[in-house]
Amino acid sequence: MKKPLALHWKIIIGMALGIVWSLLSAQFGWSTFTLNWIKPFGDIFLNALKLIALPLVLFSVIGGIIGIGNPQLLGRMGGKTLGLYLVSTVFAVTLGLVLVNLFKPGENEDVKNRLQYELWANTNEIAIKDGKCFACMEENQALVLEVEAFMATQEISDEIQGKLKTKEETQAGGPLRALVDIVPSNLFDAFVKNSMLQIIFFAIFFGLASLYIPEKEGKIVKEFIHAINEVFLKMIDFIMLLAPYFVFALMAGVLTSIAGDDFSAMLAVFEKLIYYCIVVLLGLLAMIFIFYPLLLKLFTKDFNYKEFFKNIAPAQSLAFSTSSSAATLPVTLEVVEENLKVSKKVSSFVLPIGATVNMDGTSLYQAVAAIFLAQFHMIDLSLGQQLTIIATATLASIGSAAVPSAGLVMLMIVLTSVGLNPAWIAIILPVDRLLDMVRTTVNVTGDATIATLVDKTEKHE
Ligand code: ASP
Protein backbone atom coordinates (compact mmCIF):
# COMPACT_ATOMS: atom_id res chain seq x y z
CA MET A 1 0.00 0.00 0.00
CA LYS A 2 1.23 3.50 -0.75
CA LYS A 3 2.34 5.60 2.23
CA PRO A 4 -0.13 8.47 2.87
CA LEU A 5 1.21 11.92 2.08
CA ALA A 6 2.83 13.65 5.09
CA LEU A 7 0.74 16.33 6.74
CA HIS A 8 3.06 19.21 5.86
CA TRP A 9 2.84 18.33 2.18
CA LYS A 10 -0.92 18.34 2.40
CA ILE A 11 -0.78 21.75 4.09
CA ILE A 12 1.56 23.08 1.40
CA ILE A 13 -0.77 21.76 -1.33
CA GLY A 14 -3.73 23.39 0.44
CA MET A 15 -1.81 26.65 0.56
CA ALA A 16 -0.87 26.50 -3.13
CA LEU A 17 -4.45 25.74 -4.13
CA GLY A 18 -5.58 28.68 -1.99
CA ILE A 19 -3.21 30.99 -3.90
CA VAL A 20 -4.43 29.62 -7.24
CA TRP A 21 -8.02 30.11 -6.13
CA SER A 22 -7.41 33.73 -5.15
CA LEU A 23 -5.86 34.42 -8.56
CA LEU A 24 -8.83 32.83 -10.34
CA SER A 25 -11.13 34.72 -8.04
CA ALA A 26 -9.50 38.05 -8.95
CA GLN A 27 -9.52 37.13 -12.63
CA PHE A 28 -13.17 36.10 -12.82
CA GLY A 29 -14.64 38.47 -10.23
CA TRP A 30 -15.48 35.84 -7.62
CA SER A 31 -14.22 37.80 -4.67
CA THR A 32 -17.62 38.24 -3.02
CA PHE A 33 -18.19 34.50 -3.20
CA THR A 34 -14.70 33.82 -1.82
CA LEU A 35 -15.12 36.27 1.03
CA ASN A 36 -18.59 35.03 1.94
CA TRP A 37 -18.20 31.31 1.49
CA ILE A 38 -14.54 30.37 1.69
CA LYS A 39 -12.80 32.88 3.95
CA PRO A 40 -15.03 32.06 6.99
CA PHE A 41 -13.55 28.53 7.13
CA GLY A 42 -10.08 30.07 7.40
CA ASP A 43 -11.35 32.23 10.25
CA ILE A 44 -12.82 29.17 11.97
CA PHE A 45 -9.43 27.47 11.75
CA LEU A 46 -7.62 30.45 13.24
CA ASN A 47 -10.20 30.78 15.99
CA ALA A 48 -9.91 27.11 16.90
CA LEU A 49 -6.12 27.34 17.14
CA LYS A 50 -6.27 30.53 19.18
CA LEU A 51 -8.88 28.98 21.43
CA ILE A 52 -6.40 26.31 22.41
CA ALA A 53 -3.27 28.47 22.45
CA LEU A 54 -3.89 30.46 25.64
CA PRO A 55 -5.02 27.67 27.97
CA LEU A 56 -2.28 25.52 26.48
CA VAL A 57 0.34 28.14 27.39
CA LEU A 58 -1.05 28.25 30.92
CA PHE A 59 -0.98 24.52 31.48
CA SER A 60 2.17 23.75 29.54
CA VAL A 61 4.26 26.36 31.39
CA ILE A 62 2.93 25.11 34.73
CA GLY A 63 3.58 21.53 33.59
CA GLY A 64 7.06 22.51 32.39
CA ILE A 65 7.99 24.06 35.73
CA ILE A 66 6.63 21.19 37.76
CA GLY A 67 8.45 18.81 35.41
CA ILE A 68 11.78 20.59 36.01
CA GLY A 69 11.02 20.22 39.67
CA ASN A 70 14.01 22.03 41.12
CA PRO A 71 13.87 25.84 41.43
CA GLN A 72 17.64 26.14 41.06
CA LEU A 73 17.66 24.17 37.84
CA LEU A 74 14.75 26.27 36.67
CA GLY A 75 16.69 29.49 37.28
CA ARG A 76 19.64 28.18 35.31
CA MET A 77 17.48 27.00 32.43
CA GLY A 78 15.53 30.25 32.41
CA GLY A 79 18.75 32.26 32.26
CA LYS A 80 20.11 30.12 29.45
CA THR A 81 16.86 30.35 27.49
CA LEU A 82 16.55 34.12 27.74
CA GLY A 83 20.27 34.58 26.99
CA LEU A 84 20.07 32.50 23.82
CA TYR A 85 16.89 34.26 22.73
CA LEU A 86 18.56 37.62 23.15
CA VAL A 87 21.71 36.65 21.26
CA SER A 88 19.76 35.28 18.29
CA THR A 89 17.53 38.36 18.14
CA VAL A 90 20.45 40.80 18.22
CA PHE A 91 22.12 38.76 15.47
CA ALA A 92 18.95 38.94 13.37
CA VAL A 93 18.61 42.74 13.69
CA THR A 94 22.26 43.21 12.84
CA LEU A 95 21.92 41.00 9.77
CA GLY A 96 18.90 43.07 8.71
CA LEU A 97 20.87 46.30 9.10
CA VAL A 98 23.81 44.99 7.12
CA LEU A 99 21.57 43.84 4.25
CA VAL A 100 19.54 47.03 4.04
CA ASN A 101 22.66 49.18 4.09
CA LEU A 102 24.26 47.00 1.46
CA PHE A 103 21.36 46.85 -0.99
CA LYS A 104 19.72 50.20 -0.16
CA PRO A 105 16.27 49.21 -1.44
CA GLY A 106 14.70 52.60 -0.66
CA GLU A 107 17.42 54.83 -1.97
CA ASN A 108 16.54 57.44 -4.51
CA GLU A 109 19.52 57.89 -6.76
CA ASP A 110 18.42 61.13 -8.30
CA VAL A 111 20.95 63.57 -6.86
CA LYS A 112 18.96 66.63 -7.88
CA ASN A 113 15.97 65.31 -6.01
CA ARG A 114 18.11 64.66 -3.02
CA LEU A 115 19.63 68.13 -2.91
CA GLN A 116 16.25 69.72 -3.39
CA TYR A 117 14.86 67.60 -0.63
CA GLU A 118 17.66 68.46 1.76
CA LEU A 119 17.18 72.14 1.09
CA TRP A 120 13.50 71.74 1.59
CA ALA A 121 13.97 69.66 4.76
CA ASN A 122 16.24 72.27 6.28
CA THR A 123 13.66 74.94 5.89
CA ASN A 124 10.62 72.91 6.78
CA GLU A 125 11.12 70.65 9.73
CA ILE A 126 7.48 70.11 10.57
CA ALA A 127 6.62 68.62 7.26
CA ILE A 128 9.18 65.85 7.74
CA LYS A 129 7.42 64.86 10.90
CA ASP A 130 4.18 64.93 9.02
CA GLY A 131 5.54 62.28 6.72
CA LYS A 132 3.96 63.89 3.72
CA CYS A 133 5.71 63.74 0.40
CA PHE A 134 7.08 66.60 -1.50
CA ALA A 135 6.98 68.24 -4.86
CA CYS A 136 10.53 67.15 -5.57
CA MET A 137 9.61 63.52 -5.01
CA GLU A 138 6.67 63.17 -7.29
CA GLU A 139 7.11 59.49 -7.79
CA ASN A 140 7.14 58.74 -4.10
CA GLN A 141 4.27 61.10 -3.52
CA ALA A 142 2.11 59.30 -6.03
CA LEU A 143 2.95 56.01 -4.40
CA VAL A 144 2.14 57.19 -0.90
CA LEU A 145 -1.18 58.60 -2.03
CA GLU A 146 -1.98 55.37 -3.80
CA VAL A 147 -1.01 53.35 -0.75
CA GLU A 148 -3.07 55.54 1.54
CA ALA A 149 -6.10 55.24 -0.70
CA PHE A 150 -5.59 51.51 -0.81
CA MET A 151 -5.20 51.33 2.95
CA ALA A 152 -8.48 53.09 3.49
CA THR A 153 -10.21 50.20 1.78
CA GLN A 154 -8.57 47.55 3.96
CA GLU A 155 -10.14 46.02 7.00
CA ILE A 156 -6.64 45.71 8.43
CA SER A 157 -6.55 49.46 8.96
CA ASP A 158 -9.27 49.18 11.60
CA GLU A 159 -7.39 46.39 13.24
CA ILE A 160 -4.26 48.48 13.34
CA GLN A 161 -6.15 51.51 14.61
CA GLY A 162 -7.30 49.35 17.54
CA LYS A 163 -3.77 48.26 18.30
CA LEU A 164 -2.54 51.83 18.02
CA LYS A 165 -4.84 52.84 20.81
CA THR A 166 -3.45 50.22 23.17
CA LYS A 167 0.06 51.38 22.33
CA GLU A 168 -0.82 54.94 23.22
CA GLU A 169 -2.40 53.79 26.45
CA THR A 170 0.75 51.87 27.33
CA GLN A 171 2.97 54.84 26.64
CA ALA A 172 0.83 56.99 28.89
CA GLY A 173 1.66 55.02 32.05
CA GLY A 174 5.27 56.01 32.78
CA PRO A 175 8.52 54.06 32.43
CA LEU A 176 7.54 51.09 34.61
CA ARG A 177 4.17 50.62 33.01
CA ALA A 178 5.34 47.65 30.91
CA LEU A 179 6.51 45.91 34.09
CA VAL A 180 3.25 46.61 35.88
CA ASP A 181 1.35 45.25 32.89
CA ILE A 182 3.03 41.85 33.17
CA VAL A 183 1.27 41.22 36.49
CA PRO A 184 -2.43 40.63 35.91
CA SER A 185 -4.91 41.76 38.53
CA ASN A 186 -7.42 39.27 37.23
CA LEU A 187 -6.57 36.03 35.47
CA PHE A 188 -9.76 36.02 33.41
CA ASP A 189 -9.03 39.54 32.28
CA ALA A 190 -5.64 38.30 31.04
CA PHE A 191 -7.46 35.69 28.98
CA VAL A 192 -9.96 38.22 27.67
CA LYS A 193 -7.13 40.54 26.63
CA ASN A 194 -5.21 37.62 25.07
CA SER A 195 -2.20 38.62 27.12
CA MET A 196 0.34 35.81 26.81
CA LEU A 197 2.88 37.55 29.05
CA GLN A 198 0.39 37.90 31.90
CA ILE A 199 -0.63 34.29 31.56
CA ILE A 200 3.00 33.18 31.53
CA PHE A 201 3.61 35.24 34.67
CA PHE A 202 0.70 33.54 36.42
CA ALA A 203 1.81 30.12 35.21
CA ILE A 204 5.40 30.58 36.44
CA PHE A 205 4.12 31.80 39.81
CA PHE A 206 1.65 28.93 40.11
CA GLY A 207 4.22 26.35 38.97
CA LEU A 208 6.85 27.63 41.39
CA ALA A 209 4.41 27.65 44.31
CA SER A 210 3.38 24.08 43.59
CA LEU A 211 7.01 22.99 43.96
CA TYR A 212 6.86 24.09 47.58
CA ILE A 213 3.66 22.34 48.72
CA PRO A 214 3.68 18.94 50.50
CA GLU A 215 4.62 16.01 48.28
CA LYS A 216 1.21 14.35 48.41
CA GLU A 217 -0.69 17.39 47.10
CA GLY A 218 2.16 18.21 44.72
CA LYS A 219 1.70 14.85 43.05
CA ILE A 220 -2.01 15.46 42.55
CA VAL A 221 -1.35 18.85 40.92
CA LYS A 222 1.29 17.30 38.68
CA GLU A 223 -0.97 14.52 37.47
CA PHE A 224 -3.90 16.84 36.96
CA ILE A 225 -1.87 19.28 34.86
CA HIS A 226 -0.37 16.42 32.87
CA ALA A 227 -3.82 15.01 32.10
CA ILE A 228 -5.17 18.40 30.99
CA ASN A 229 -2.19 18.87 28.68
CA GLU A 230 -2.92 15.52 27.10
CA VAL A 231 -6.46 16.64 26.30
CA PHE A 232 -5.21 19.81 24.63
CA LEU A 233 -2.76 17.86 22.53
CA LYS A 234 -5.57 15.60 21.39
CA MET A 235 -7.66 18.62 20.44
CA ILE A 236 -4.79 19.83 18.28
CA ASP A 237 -4.53 16.43 16.60
CA PHE A 238 -8.18 16.68 15.66
CA ILE A 239 -7.84 20.19 14.27
CA MET A 240 -4.72 19.29 12.33
CA LEU A 241 -6.48 16.46 10.54
CA LEU A 242 -8.48 19.11 8.73
CA ALA A 243 -5.66 21.66 8.49
CA PRO A 244 -4.99 21.30 4.73
CA TYR A 245 -8.59 22.24 3.88
CA PHE A 246 -8.65 25.07 6.38
CA VAL A 247 -5.34 26.39 5.10
CA PHE A 248 -6.76 26.49 1.59
CA ALA A 249 -9.62 28.67 2.87
CA LEU A 250 -7.23 30.82 4.89
CA MET A 251 -4.93 31.58 1.95
CA ALA A 252 -7.78 32.16 -0.50
CA GLY A 253 -9.47 34.49 2.03
CA VAL A 254 -6.38 36.48 2.97
CA LEU A 255 -5.26 37.07 -0.61
CA THR A 256 -8.73 37.90 -1.84
CA SER A 257 -9.29 40.45 0.90
CA ILE A 258 -6.02 42.11 -0.13
CA ALA A 259 -6.52 41.99 -3.87
CA GLY A 260 -10.30 42.02 -4.32
CA ASP A 261 -11.21 41.70 -7.96
CA ASP A 262 -8.26 43.67 -9.24
CA PHE A 263 -4.94 41.94 -8.98
CA SER A 264 -3.14 44.09 -11.52
CA ALA A 265 -3.91 47.26 -9.58
CA MET A 266 -2.33 45.64 -6.57
CA LEU A 267 0.75 44.70 -8.52
CA ALA A 268 1.26 48.30 -9.65
CA VAL A 269 1.39 49.44 -6.03
CA PHE A 270 3.69 46.57 -5.20
CA GLU A 271 6.25 47.34 -7.85
CA LYS A 272 8.14 49.94 -5.86
CA LEU A 273 8.10 47.74 -2.80
CA ILE A 274 9.36 44.58 -4.42
CA TYR A 275 13.01 45.41 -3.89
CA TYR A 276 12.31 46.04 -0.21
CA CYS A 277 10.57 42.67 0.03
CA ILE A 278 13.50 40.92 -1.62
CA VAL A 279 15.92 42.34 0.95
CA VAL A 280 13.69 41.35 3.91
CA LEU A 281 13.17 37.89 2.42
CA LEU A 282 16.89 37.45 1.82
CA GLY A 283 17.56 38.07 5.50
CA LEU A 284 14.70 35.89 6.67
CA LEU A 285 15.69 32.99 4.44
CA ALA A 286 19.32 33.29 5.59
CA MET A 287 18.07 32.92 9.17
CA ILE A 288 16.08 29.81 8.33
CA PHE A 289 18.45 28.05 5.99
CA ILE A 290 21.89 29.18 7.24
CA PHE A 291 21.87 30.68 10.75
CA TYR A 292 19.75 28.16 12.66
CA PRO A 293 21.20 25.06 10.98
CA LEU A 294 24.69 26.46 11.63
CA LEU A 295 23.89 26.99 15.32
CA LEU A 296 22.59 23.45 15.59
CA LYS A 297 25.52 22.03 13.68
CA LEU A 298 28.00 23.82 15.93
CA PHE A 299 26.38 22.95 19.22
CA THR A 300 24.78 19.57 18.72
CA LYS A 301 26.53 16.39 17.66
CA ASP A 302 24.07 14.57 15.46
CA PHE A 303 22.58 17.35 13.35
CA ASN A 304 21.16 16.42 9.98
CA TYR A 305 20.12 19.31 7.74
CA LYS A 306 17.42 17.52 5.75
CA GLU A 307 15.99 15.72 8.75
CA PHE A 308 15.72 18.96 10.70
CA PHE A 309 13.55 20.60 8.06
CA LYS A 310 11.48 17.48 7.57
CA ASN A 311 10.87 17.38 11.29
CA ILE A 312 9.77 20.96 11.77
CA ALA A 313 7.94 21.36 8.45
CA PRO A 314 4.43 21.05 9.95
CA ALA A 315 5.11 23.94 12.35
CA GLN A 316 6.78 26.03 9.64
CA SER A 317 3.99 25.55 7.13
CA LEU A 318 1.39 26.41 9.74
CA ALA A 319 3.32 29.51 10.83
CA PHE A 320 3.46 30.56 7.19
CA SER A 321 -0.25 30.17 6.63
CA THR A 322 -1.49 31.63 9.94
CA SER A 323 1.11 34.42 10.45
CA SER A 324 0.83 33.81 14.15
CA SER A 325 3.39 32.13 16.39
CA ALA A 326 0.73 31.88 19.09
CA ALA A 327 -1.68 30.00 16.85
CA THR A 328 1.19 27.76 15.72
CA LEU A 329 2.43 27.07 19.25
CA PRO A 330 0.42 23.90 19.81
CA VAL A 331 1.93 22.33 16.71
CA THR A 332 5.41 23.69 17.48
CA LEU A 333 5.23 21.93 20.85
CA GLU A 334 4.16 18.72 19.22
CA VAL A 335 6.85 18.60 16.52
CA VAL A 336 9.64 19.73 18.84
CA GLU A 337 8.79 16.99 21.33
CA GLU A 338 7.94 14.21 18.96
CA ASN A 339 10.16 14.86 15.94
CA LEU A 340 13.11 16.78 17.34
CA LYS A 341 13.02 14.62 20.49
CA VAL A 342 13.34 17.54 22.88
CA SER A 343 12.26 16.57 26.38
CA LYS A 344 8.83 17.74 27.43
CA LYS A 345 10.40 19.36 30.46
CA VAL A 346 12.39 21.75 28.27
CA SER A 347 9.94 22.30 25.41
CA SER A 348 6.97 23.14 27.60
CA PHE A 349 9.00 25.83 29.32
CA VAL A 350 11.13 27.19 26.47
CA LEU A 351 8.59 27.24 23.61
CA PRO A 352 5.64 29.16 25.12
CA ILE A 353 8.07 31.82 26.35
CA GLY A 354 9.77 31.84 22.95
CA ALA A 355 6.48 32.29 21.10
CA THR A 356 5.96 35.45 23.11
CA VAL A 357 9.41 37.00 23.42
CA ASN A 358 11.66 35.48 20.77
CA MET A 359 10.92 36.96 17.37
CA ASP A 360 14.07 36.99 15.29
CA GLY A 361 12.16 37.36 12.02
CA THR A 362 10.18 40.28 13.36
CA SER A 363 13.25 42.12 14.64
CA LEU A 364 15.14 41.62 11.35
CA TYR A 365 12.16 42.89 9.38
CA GLN A 366 11.76 45.93 11.65
CA ALA A 367 15.38 46.92 11.13
CA VAL A 368 15.13 46.63 7.34
CA ALA A 369 11.76 48.41 7.25
CA ALA A 370 12.93 51.33 9.39
CA ILE A 371 16.01 51.97 7.26
CA PHE A 372 14.07 51.41 4.03
CA LEU A 373 11.56 54.06 5.06
CA ALA A 374 14.36 56.44 5.95
CA GLN A 375 16.03 55.82 2.58
CA PHE A 376 12.70 56.24 0.85
CA HIS A 377 12.38 59.71 2.38
CA MET A 378 16.02 60.48 1.68
CA ILE A 379 17.03 60.58 5.31
CA ASP A 380 20.48 59.31 6.23
CA LEU A 381 20.62 57.64 9.60
CA SER A 382 23.86 57.99 11.58
CA LEU A 383 25.69 55.04 13.12
CA GLY A 384 24.29 56.05 16.50
CA GLN A 385 20.77 55.95 15.13
CA GLN A 386 21.40 52.55 13.58
CA LEU A 387 22.62 51.28 16.95
CA THR A 388 19.45 52.68 18.49
CA ILE A 389 17.54 50.61 15.93
CA ILE A 390 19.33 47.46 17.14
CA ALA A 391 18.19 48.16 20.69
CA THR A 392 14.64 49.22 19.90
CA ALA A 393 13.99 46.52 17.30
CA THR A 394 15.16 43.92 19.82
CA LEU A 395 12.81 45.31 22.47
CA ALA A 396 9.97 45.90 20.02
CA SER A 397 10.15 42.30 18.83
CA ILE A 398 10.05 41.10 22.44
CA GLY A 399 7.01 43.30 22.98
CA SER A 400 5.22 42.21 19.81
CA ALA A 401 2.28 39.92 20.38
CA ALA A 402 2.48 36.63 18.52
CA VAL A 403 -0.39 37.50 16.19
CA PRO A 404 -0.60 38.76 12.58
CA SER A 405 0.62 42.33 11.98
CA ALA A 406 1.91 42.81 15.53
CA GLY A 407 5.42 43.45 14.22
CA LEU A 408 4.11 46.19 11.93
CA VAL A 409 2.44 47.99 14.83
CA MET A 410 5.55 47.76 16.99
CA LEU A 411 7.61 49.07 14.08
CA MET A 412 6.14 52.46 14.97
CA ILE A 413 8.15 52.43 18.19
CA VAL A 414 11.34 51.73 16.24
CA LEU A 415 10.57 54.56 13.82
CA THR A 416 9.80 57.00 16.63
CA SER A 417 13.03 56.11 18.45
CA VAL A 418 15.12 57.51 15.61
CA GLY A 419 12.88 60.47 14.85
CA LEU A 420 11.05 59.01 11.85
CA ASN A 421 7.34 59.31 11.33
CA PRO A 422 5.41 56.29 12.65
CA ALA A 423 2.63 56.90 10.11
CA TRP A 424 5.03 55.75 7.39
CA ILE A 425 4.07 52.17 8.14
CA ALA A 426 1.26 52.87 5.66
CA ILE A 427 3.80 52.73 2.86
CA ILE A 428 4.84 49.15 3.51
CA LEU A 429 1.44 47.92 4.61
CA PRO A 430 0.38 46.43 1.26
CA VAL A 431 3.22 43.93 1.27
CA ASP A 432 3.25 43.32 4.98
CA ARG A 433 1.17 40.20 5.07
CA LEU A 434 3.53 38.28 2.83
CA LEU A 435 6.50 39.31 4.95
CA ASP A 436 4.53 38.50 8.09
CA MET A 437 4.08 34.95 6.86
CA VAL A 438 7.79 34.45 6.35
CA ARG A 439 8.91 36.27 9.50
CA THR A 440 6.51 34.18 11.58
CA THR A 441 8.09 31.08 10.04
CA VAL A 442 11.49 32.42 11.15
CA ASN A 443 10.14 33.16 14.64
CA VAL A 444 8.87 29.62 15.05
CA THR A 445 12.04 28.04 13.61
CA GLY A 446 14.09 30.16 16.04
CA ASP A 447 12.05 28.94 19.00
CA ALA A 448 12.45 25.31 17.92
CA THR A 449 16.21 25.79 17.45
CA ILE A 450 16.77 27.35 20.86
CA ALA A 451 14.60 24.68 22.52
CA THR A 452 16.82 22.02 20.92
CA LEU A 453 19.99 23.78 22.08
CA VAL A 454 18.74 24.20 25.65
CA ASP A 455 17.68 20.56 25.70
CA LYS A 456 21.07 19.35 24.43
CA THR A 457 23.05 21.37 26.98
CA GLU A 458 20.77 20.23 29.80
CA LYS A 459 21.29 16.60 28.85
CA HIS A 460 25.06 16.87 28.71
CA GLU A 461 25.34 18.23 32.21
N1 ASP B 1 3.08 37.56 13.18
C1 ASP B 1 4.30 37.46 13.93
C2 ASP B 1 4.23 36.28 14.87
O1 ASP B 1 3.18 35.91 15.31
C3 ASP B 1 4.58 38.71 14.69
C4 ASP B 1 4.86 39.80 13.70
O2 ASP B 1 3.91 40.47 13.27
O3 ASP B 1 6.02 39.98 13.30
O4 ASP B 1 5.24 35.70 15.18
Image (tube, rainbow, N blue to C red):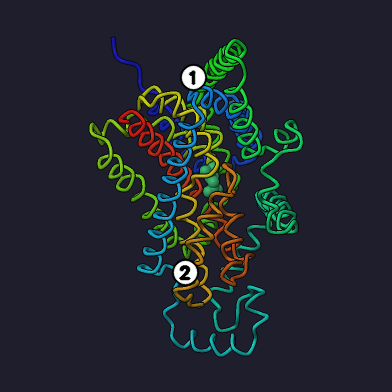
Q: Upstream in the sequence, badge 1 or badge 2?
A: 1
The crowding category of the residue bearing disc 2, from other C-alpha atoms within 10 Å (few below 14, some 14 to 19, many at least 20), is: some
Regarding mark 1 in the picture, which secondary structure is present there?
Answer: helix
Q: CA distance from mark 1 to mark 2?
A: 46 Å
The crowding category of the residue bearing disc 1, from other C-alpha atoms within 10 Å (few below 14, some 14 to 19, many at least 20), is: few
Side of 21 relative to 34 (left or right)? left
- Amino acid under disc 2: Gln
Give the quadrant of the C terminus. Answer: top left
Disc 1 under 8 Å from ligand 1? The reply is no
What residue is at 41 percent from the left and 31 percent from the top? 13
- Amino acid under disc 1: Leu
Give the quadrant of the N terminus. Answer: top left
- Please provide percent x and percent y for residue 428: 54, 60
Q: Which residue is mark 1?
A: 241
- Please provide percent x and percent y for residue 82: 47, 44
Q: Could you tell me if the residues under marks 1 and 2 are in contact, i.e. CB atoms within 8 Å?
A: no
Q: Which residue is mark 2?
A: 386
Pick the residue in front: 196 or 246: 196
Q: Is residue 246 visible?
A: yes
Depth-wise, is mark 1 or mark 2 nearer the camera?
A: 2
What residue is at 60 percent from the left and 80 percent from the top? 134
Q: Is residue 25 visible?
A: no
Regarding mark 2 in the picture, which secondary structure is present there?
Answer: helix
> Residue 81 — which label?
none
Side of 361 relative to 143 (left or right)? left
